[in-house]
Image (cartoon, rainbow, N blue to C red):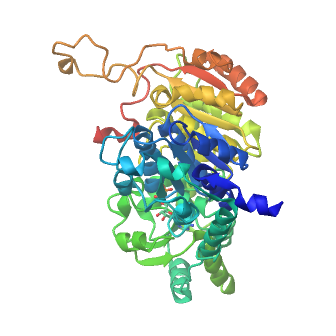
Amino acid sequence: NSQTTSQTLIDGNTLAAKSLAAYGITHMFGVVGIPVTSFANRAVAAGIRFIAFHNEQSAGYAASAYGYLTGRPGILLTVSGPGCVHGLAGLSNAMINTWPMVLISGSCDQSDVGRGDFQELNQIEAAKPFSKHVGKAKDIKEIPKCFFEALDSAVLGRPGGCYLDLPTDVLHQTISESEADSLIKSAVDVSEIEKGAKKMSIASLEVERAVDLLRNAERPLIVFGKGAAYARAENELKRLVESTGFPFLPTPMGKGLLPDTHELAASAARSLAIGKCDVALVVGARLNWLLHFGEQPKWSKDVKFILVDVSEEEIELRKPHLGLAGDAKKVLELVNKEIKENPFCLGKNHPWLEAITKKTKENVSRMEAQLAKDVVPFNFLTPMRIIRNAILEVGSPAPVLVSEGANTMDVGRAVLVQTEPRTRLDAGTWGTMGVGLGYCIAAAVAEPHRLVVAVEGDSGFGFSAMEVETLVRYQLPVVVIVFNNGGVYGGDRRNPEEIAGPFKDDPAPTSFVPGAAYHVLIEAFGGKGYLVGTPDELKSALSESFTARKPAVINVIIDPYAGSESGRMQHKN
Ligand code: ADP
């Protein structure tokens, strides 16, 4: 009867699991151990899918990408001390990419702090530099409130990483179930998400000024990034581009918001587009290194930037001609509405569009001529063309593409075609290598209707290669294509004078075991492995694995001296 239920005692583990479920969390990534194993089990019992990894770093990357793909906080669960430290990789990645994530970590007994307890660490201080919010439940009664604060903070305003600390003693405390339920209810009641705090007001005067600038631009350009993808602004962008006839340029992860094949896509004429535009509307993309800080010589001196960003600090930092602070989808709705009242359109014969189209055609045909050749042993281009065609053949829903590596990512960005929003995950703002397997797993659970295809270098793959076991364990539809050129950048590219000293006969710092059998790794767990070195072998492996939609690794042997050191970032190495 209800009397007995209300007096039933529950512990901190159960209350933590119930709090997550009450917030609507459906997935959690992590590695269990002391003191969080029961929490993970209770979370599963509460209806949350727990994806168990081998390493917190990879699980953390998964949680960060899950946040990006779903717009809900990605959750990483770690053990105390070293588990938390490994998890900081994912947390920092979420923070830098502005993706919502919460790292929940067990911590040592509060009464033993300072005495060298098992896995003791001041985790709050460790997490602070990588978090927009840190919290600690010091008593079981604080659990629901602490969870809701961390989860709200991850998604409100500019999304980011948050940290929540759960001491061992708090997980073991008990309270009555009825008190627990009322604590959860109060947490739900104060949740800012529930109150719709996400709404920001956008000044209509600013929207009018922005539209005036666009209307009078001679060489306009629309640039959009992963912030626009996160905001799910694809329909508004499509309407804007198609009503104005303005050319557009996606950032690497903005690719797919509008199809790469769109006639107004200026990606293949990027240097011309950014070098000559006079007004650039930049939506959900920072003017950081990826966009050359918005400065000369890549951009012209007089370009007027209109920045659309959810973060007012970001707009202040960049000092654009005009800033529109707010959610990209909402801002673009207002912009479209304003344009509709007094429409304008560039028209195909406009000299600016003609110049971009001409440049695009030239560059595309030059690239296609390179791609058309079957080069064996493989360079980067030949296998990339074959993969591009195989991905396009899958059609809709398009696969999620995960990409990392130096040359592999650079060449892939230019060659692989993105046709649907949020179908590209790559090294991102930080150029983080080692994200691949975590991102694959996140994409497979967040977008179960899509195939996931990773195209990555052998070095990127190696960071978390053991997670292929995780792919097999959960039977995820992920095909990992490893561009195996035997090392970081591939081969031994040292100058002769650099090969000296007592350890000169060691392998070069950039090289791995040549011809490593990465495909055998997944077979150890019952997955499917392919070793390919020719176009026909690759085509057949892709066709079989894409149809099977089962975990597979395709080990593609690449000429170790193809490509360049550091890809396109050689000047920094
Ligand atoms: P990219 O790597 O694609 O250039 P960035 O990560 O540099 O993109 O920039 C993304 C920007 O989008 C960040 O400055 C972030 O504040 C912003 N952003 C995040 N969510 C939204 C949103 N809902 N609406 C508008 N901007 C957003």
Residue drawn at 43 percent across, 40 percent down: 86
Q: Looking at this rendering, what residue extends furthest in the right direction?
A: 1
Q: Is residue 459 above or below residue 414?
A: above
Residue 92 in the image: state x and y as whole percent: 42, 50
Whether 35 is drawn above or below 70: the answer is above
Image position, residue 419 (x, y; %) = 68, 49
Q: Front-most of 386 and 24?
A: 24
Quadrant for the N terminus, please. Answer: bottom right
Of residue 81 and residue 306, the one placed in the foreground of this image is 81
Asked if 336 appears above or below 167 in the picture, the reply is below
How many marks the image carries: the answer is 0
Viewer can see residue 475: yes
Q: Is residue 365 visible?
A: no
Q: In the current view of this chain or complex, which residue is farthest to the top? A: 505
Q: Residue at x 46, y 30 (%)?
A: 463
In-front residue for pair 264/124:
124
Q: Give x and y (percent) for residue 426.
A: 52, 44
Is residue 502 toward the left or the right of residue 332 in the image?
A: left
Left or right of 416? Residue 502 is left
Q: Quadrant of the C terminus?
A: top left
User: Residue, x 21% and y 17% (percent of image)?
Assistant: 499
Please identify the residue farthest to the left as the structure is shown.
Answer: 501
Image point (58%, 53%), residue name: 12
Q: Does residue 543 lie above or below 398 as drawn?
A: above
Whole-percent x, y for residue 456 in the image:
53, 32
Image quarter of residue 152: bottom right
Relative side of 334 to 433, left or right: right
